[in-house]
Amino acid sequence: MIDFIFKGSILPAEQDVGSEELRFRLFDNLGEVHLFSFDNSYSTIGVGICMGDREVASRHIRFSLLNISRNPRHSLFSLDYMRGSSFIIITWHQDGDVGFDALLDQVQSLRGSFCDTSIAIAVQANDGEPDIPVLAAMIDDALHLPCIIVENHNELLNQLLLGSMQQEPSLCLLPVRSLDEIGPARPRPNDSSFRLPASKRLLALLQDAGFTFVDNRTILMKKQQWLFEISLDEARVHVAHASCMDCNRFSMCKESFKKLCIVQAAPEGFASKALGLQSSDLFFLSLIYAIEFDQLPSTVVGQFPNRKNCSYMQHA
């Protein structure tokens, strides 16, 4: 017999691209039955869903866990998905794009919106970063709420379910030194994580390599016949004929660029740990490499616009 049914949510810290893999690894291993996920035809917009059963304090608990995307395209739905959650897990990378103060602001905001909800911070800690007890004390002082350090993801879930059952909201901290501590990742043949924004680490590497940036998150690559514009926010790729650049209307022309359909066909690369990159970064790198060395597949090249006389062409 089921004694309690609870709903939980897991999401990354605001704009923290570095903790995406931690979020997915926890989602893969906390739930037992994955009903809807990002990798199948039953995906809902910006959320994956799994379910599981636990025995906590001699009570049988059934829970659902919603894996909520923080992609800007899905931000409209995020709060709606979290409503009714008995607990919320936030993933954060200590060496990622989000600082400690921004993390605390997010926790405070969630506590304001969900005052009776337990909150946990799963932090991917690196060697040389502040000790976990020190970090817990900083969180305690900032939020004026005792921070409970848990040893592993199973203890984390048990603590959150216990607080939900006793109606005593708590604040937990789970340190993760390696993703392998949590368990294996579920295969995602159609992984959509490449749609996530590129990390600051990749942006810095591309800037150091001398790539041309149209703005802070868009690369312009010039080839002999083609001009490529790559958005590092959502992996959008547009191509235009190089001759369009000779037109003084080029910057305002809406017909010069054509959007390409490019699908990630490779699993996570082996260089992510060595370079400090994530799967979405490796997708961007493979895309940029293919353009730079003329290695785009025929299925993509076939989408290039035909060269035609343009009635709008105006030469300087």
Image (cartoon, helix red, strand yellow):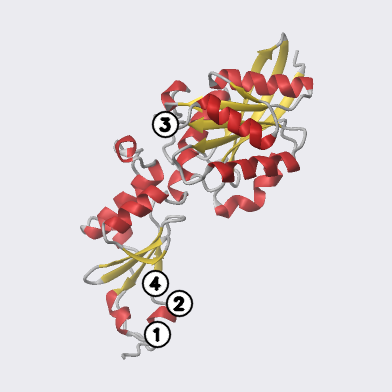
Q: Position of residue 279 (x, y in %)?
A: 39, 42
**Mark 4–mark 1 CB contact (< 8 Å):** no
Residue type highlighted by circle 2: Lys
Residue type highlighted by circle 3: Asn
Report helix, strand or loop for mark 3.
Answer: loop
**Left of 100 or right of it: where is 285?**
left
**Left of 189 or right of it: where is 160?**
right
Residue type highlighted by circle 4: Phe
Q: Position of residue 214 (x, y in %)?
A: 38, 68
Quadrant occupied by the C terminus: bottom left
Around disc 3, counting alpha carbons within 10 Å, would you say few (fewer than 14), some (14 to 19), or many (20 or more)?
A: some
**Mark 2–mark 3 CB contact (< 8 Å):** no
For image coordinates 48% across by 33% down, the residue present is 22
Name the residue that disc number 2 marks: 254
In the depicted view, which residue is nearer to us: 263 or 146? 146
The Cα atoms of the two marked residues, 4 and 2, are separated by 7 Å
Report helix, strand or loop for mark 2.
Answer: loop
Instruction: Name the front one of labels 1 and 2.
Output: 1
Name the residue that disc number 3 marks: 126
Instruction: Name the front one of labels 3 and 1.
Output: 3
Name the residue that disc number 1 marks: 249
Tell me the quarter of the picture where residue 212 sits: bottom left
For image coordinates 51% across by 26% down, the residue present is 132
- Specify which label sits upstream in the sequence, 1 or 2: 1
* Mark drawn on residue 257: 4
In the displayed structure, would residue 94 be above or below residue 250?
above
